[in-house]
Amino acid sequence: MNVYFAHPCFNDAQEAFKTEFLSKLSSALSHRQDIIIMDPFDHTPNIEGDRETKLKMAEDVKIECIRLLEECDVVIALVDGSDTGVAFEAGYAHAVNKPVILISQGDCSTANAMLIGAAKMMFDNILDKEQMEKLAGMLEWFDATISKYPGKPWDN
């Protein structure tokens, strides 16, 4: 099962969170090699710091991220920081009937109401071990459900 991780990664704090989150999630899913986390930053350059490059490459980045979203089965969206890219990715996923799971280092309820309304689940304080284990369990449930009912449209 492919899981798209929608998140901002434009400064040191965001990079540190990503590293810690992916490490903890990987540990929580260590017995499940069939659940693959897809990070769009592994497939596209970070173009946010250079206006000219961003304007030139924005379409290519969008196309690649949409391709990855189409290939995924579930989207995890980090709602901290009000990132418009994350909102786009979560909204696109919802529109094409991919389940969206919201996560936050703090409280998901501070996110935009439309993101909350599109989410199947929300996990606050995601770096806490208990919350990470719940997220891993939810991903395992989605994997089992998707395997049992391939092509099932989610009731968005």
Image (spheres, grey):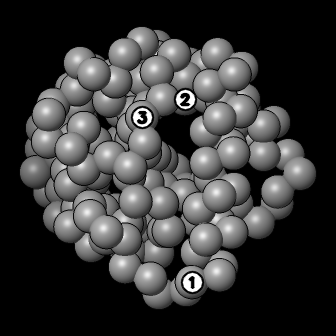
Disc 2 is placed on an element classified as helix
Answer with mark 1 or mark 2, whichever residue precedes in sequence.
2
Cα–Cα gap, marks 1 and 2: 31 Å
Whole-percent x, y for residue 29 in the image: 78, 46
- The foreground one among 113 and 75 is 113
113 horizontally vs 39: left or right:
left
Quarter of the figure with the N terminus: bottom right
Q: Amino acid at mark 1?
A: Tyr
Q: Which mark is residue 103?
A: none
Whole-percent x, y for residue 39 in the image: 51, 50
Q: Which mark is residue 149?
A: 1
Disc 3 is placed on an element classified as strand
Specify few, some or many for label 3: CA neighbours under 10 Å numbering under 14, 14-19, or 20 or more.
many
Query: Can you identify the residue that label 3 sits on?
Result: 122
Query: Can you identify the residue that label 2 sits on?
Result: 18
Residue 10 visible to the viewer: no
